[in-house]
Image: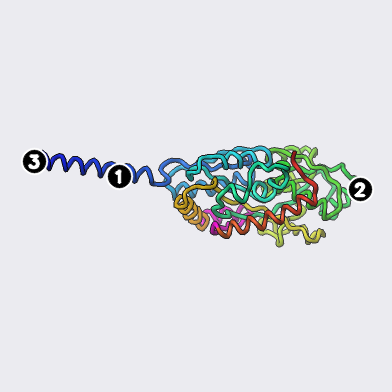
């Protein structure tokens, strides 16, 4: 009898341990989460992503490791993310470039931005700032347009890569202003600034989060912002529409994605903690100081937004003739 009770006790104890081990294994996350940034260190996506990653790590109780994988206008890092194991431990900070513009530039797109990912939430939006090299004799967009028309094909505009939102912002300016400026792609806008300082690149679109220090130092000159209204961090800089280019609207957005088929309960956990991070005063104040507006949406709302953005930018890509072979 005693032996039976003892055996039963140990059996129950082993079962309890096994149950607790299984529970621990199912707890998500129980190890570090990787957040892929498809652009270089120091760019807008990288800076904003690190703010979110740091706060999310506190809420997850696990490290969120930022993994920069730049190249091909953001599509290289996006391809790495979409082929990762769908377990919730790999996330992607996507942008207008990677999920609304890039796929329309390829005859055979490297991924389907609407079906190959699970949209989690829109993170932030930010206007672009149209800047010129400090050496350029253009004090306004009107001056820039006149200079470009007087010297067709002589002015260069840099971007974070062919097919990025910064590239298409320049193409949209060319279309609406009727000017001929030459696109020069880089792997990220952080790599364009030295060329701006030297004067070999004359025009650049970038977000305030990256551009502000250089504007304040007088190393580049801000001529306009791409959104519908002026921004607090650059109150004296007019919108591009105000400056004489009707219909110009090219804000940049950032959003969090996971590979398709991640278990729903894990996506729900990621969504909940990231929204908490976005609603914290710390993140909101940091975003505002960088010229960005935090968003935070449901997966369904973000999915609907993605569809609308794809339709919008597909038309711009077609009109511009931009493509990647």
For the question of whether residue 122 can be seen, the reply is yes
For the question of whether residue 216 can be seen, the reply is no
The percent coordinates of residue 46 (x first, y second) are: 60, 44
Label 1, label 2: how many angstroms apart (C-alpha)?
74 Å
Query: Tag 2's secondary structure?
Result: helix
Which of the two discs, 1 and 2, labels the residue nearer the N terminus?
1
Where, by quadrant of the figure, is residue 292 drawn? bottom right
Query: Tag 1's secondary structure?
Result: helix
In this view, the residue in front, 252 or 259, is 259
Which of the two discs, 3 and 1, labels the residue nearer the N terminus?
3
Nearest-to-viewer mark from 3 and 2? 3
Q: Is residue 59 left or right of residue 195?
A: left
Where, by quadrant of the figure, is residue 299 drawn? bottom right
Q: Which residue is mark 3?
A: 2
Taking the magenta stretch, the answer to whether it contains residue 20 is no
Q: Residue furthest right?
A: 150
Q: Which residues are magenta?
A: 281-299
The quarter in which the N terminus is drawn is: top left
Nearest-to-viewer mark from 1 and 2? 1
- Local packing at callout 2 (Cα closer than 10 Å; few below 14, some 14-19, many 20+) is few
Query: Tag 3's secondary structure?
Result: helix
Q: Which residue is mark 2?
A: 150
Residues at badges 1 and 2 in contact (C-beta under 8 Å)? Answer: no
Taking the magenta stretch, the answer to whether it contains residue 293 is yes
Q: Which residue is mark 1?
A: 20
């Amino acid at each position: 009898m005693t032996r039976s009770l003892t055996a039963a006790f140990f059996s129950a104890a082993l079962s309890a341990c096994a149950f607790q081990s299984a529970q621990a294994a199912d707890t998500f996350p129980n190890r570090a989460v990787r957040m892929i940034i498809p652009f270089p260190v120091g760019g807008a996506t990288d800076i904003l992503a690190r703010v979110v990653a740091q706060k999310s790590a506190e809420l997850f109780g696990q490290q969120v490791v930022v993994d920069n994988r730049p190249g091909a206008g953001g599509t290289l890092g996006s391809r790495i993310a979409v082929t990762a194991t769908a377990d919730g431990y790999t996330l992607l900070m996507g942008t207008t470039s990677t999920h609304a513009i890039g796929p329309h530039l390829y005859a055979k797109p490297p991924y389907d931005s609407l079906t190959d990912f699970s949209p989690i939430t829109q993170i932030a939006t930010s206007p672009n700032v149209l800047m010129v090299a400090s050496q350029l004799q253009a004090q306004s967009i009107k001056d820039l347009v006149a200079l470009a028309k007087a010297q067709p094909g002589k002015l260069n505009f840099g971007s974070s890569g062919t097919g990025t939102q910064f590239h298409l912002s320049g193409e949209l300016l060319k279309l609406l202003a009727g000017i001929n400026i030459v696109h020069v792609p880089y792997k990220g806008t952080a790599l364009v600034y030295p060329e701006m300082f030297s004067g070999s690149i004359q025009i650049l679109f970038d977000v305030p989060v990256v551009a502000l220090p250089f504007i304040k130092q007088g190393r580049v000159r801000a001529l306009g912002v791409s959104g519908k209204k002026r921004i607090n961090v650059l109150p004296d800089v007019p919108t591009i529409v105000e400056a004489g280019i009707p219909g110009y609207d090219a804000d940049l957005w950032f959003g969090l994605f996971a590979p398709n088929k991640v278990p729903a309960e894990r996506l729900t956990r990621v969504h909940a903690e990231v929204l908490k991070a976005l609603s914290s005063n710390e993140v909101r104040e940091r975003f505002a100081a960088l010229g960005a507006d935090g968003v935070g949406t449901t997966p369904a709302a973000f999915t609907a937004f993605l569809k609308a953005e794809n339709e919008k930018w597909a038309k711009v890509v077609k009109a511009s003739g931009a493509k990647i072979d």
